[in-house]
Amino acid sequence: MTGLMLKDMYSLRTYFLKQLALMTVLYLAISVGLMKNFSFLDFIREVGKHITVNYMMSKDSVKKRLSADSTNGMSFTEFTYQLVQGYDFLYLRRNYNCLLQMGGSDQWGNITTGAELIRRTNGGEVFALTCPLITKADGGKFGKTESGNIWLDPRYTSPYKFYQFWLNVSDSDAERYIKIFTSIEKEEIEALIAEHQAAPHLRILQKRLAKEVTVMVHSEDDYNAAVDASNILFGNATSEALRKLDEDTLLAVFEGVPQFEISRDALTGGVKAVDLFVDNAAVFASKGEMRKLVQGGGVSLNKEKLAAFDQVITAADLLDEKYLLVQRGKKNYYLLIAK
């Protein structure tokens, strides 16, 4: 019975996320459409006259920004935003019989301004529903206006980066997020927290959180691929695992490592590794340095130990027909791009 209930919960959550996405698109389309032929003067004449400055100043969010303790102050745009958002609610109520607006707790003032605008113009009862704002370890909120935001759409945040985000949250955030973003039962969460606290270096909470959320938003296959990709950089992955990566994931995994452009034509006829990694790409400072590291087993190409410093590299060695991954020592990676 519990399994059935959890399955139904996941189905319901998936349905809700899809409906929420559709409503968001509809809301944005309506907002753009309704303001398209609505001038600023029309807006303040038709809408602004219904809400007083005193009412807008009474909002806690405005008071905090205008208080003596605030160093940033508040722009006119920010001050009037509650009126614009309030009009959105009014328009949706008039034209689509919308009765409920939902948002984070920081939107309470804007939403209630909409409810007040409806009361003073259209009349009738509407409702506001907010939930506590989910913040990151640094106190910043999740949102498109914040840096480091995480998208559900894989076009904007790949499953690998999505997985890595949850895997790298702090211990305190992991304890909160696993309760908010997963459907794991309370008893199991408490057991996971206790296990994590006994051996925090194993990151048990983060690993379970990352798995649950990645599978829910993307898929089991995407989760497994993200784990394999992580092992390439941080574990003992094989050349076979490296070659399974698609180009986007490969670039995401090795984002930030030094990159060099090399000639594809040179690879067609074959080029010695020592020439390629010293003369064509500055992976090594000298041929002598490379020779010494290769003899000690400290150089790998595409996750395979380089057998000889003068081993011939050809186009057949390219990953995704474009890349060569050179590893010097345990932690130094270089990405060579054939053009």
Image (cartoon, rainbow, N blue to C red):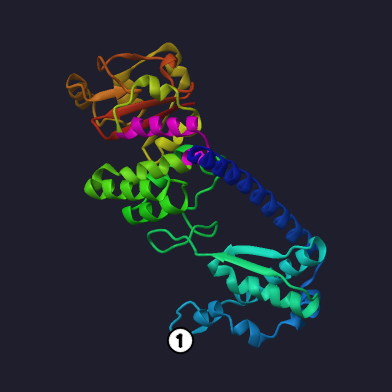
Q: Residue at x 69, y 53 (%)?
A: 23
Residue most extreme to the front: 1
What residue is shown with label 1?
68
Residue 56 in the figure: left or right of residue 164: right
Q: Main secondary structure of the magenta part?
A: helix
Q: In the figure, 182 relative to 89: above or below?
A: above
In the rendered image, which quarter is residue 155 located in?
top right
**Residue 220 is a magenta residue:** yes
Is residue 60 in sight in this rendering?
A: yes
Residue kind at label 1, given as amino acid type: Ala
Residue 123 percent location from the top left of the image = 79, 76
**Left or right, residue 259 beside residue 31:** left
Does 293 sit above or below residue 138? above
The residue carrying pointer 1 sits among few (fewer than 14), some (14 to 19) or many (20 or more) residues within 10 Å by Cα, namely few
How far across and how far down the image is residue 60, in percent? 54, 79
Residue 197 sits above or below residue 298 on the image: below
| Rendered residue at 74%/79% (across/down) | 48
Q: Is residue 16 above or below residue 143?
A: above
Q: Which residues are magenta?
A: 214-234
Which is nearer the eye, 187 or 115?
Answer: 187
Q: Considering the numbered disc 1 on the image, is that residue within a helix, a strand or a loop? A: loop
Q: Is residue 48 magenta?
A: no
Task: Please provide percent x and percent y for residue 111.
Answer: 64, 70
Q: Is residue 134 left or right of residue 275?
A: right
Q: Residue at x 22, y 25 (%)?
A: 298
Q: Residue at x 47, y 46 (%)?
A: 183
Residue in the foreground of this view, choosing between 268 and 151: 151
Which is nearer the eye, 302 or 154? 154
Answer yes or no: is residue 217 visible.
no
| Residue 75 pos. (x, y %) | 58, 76
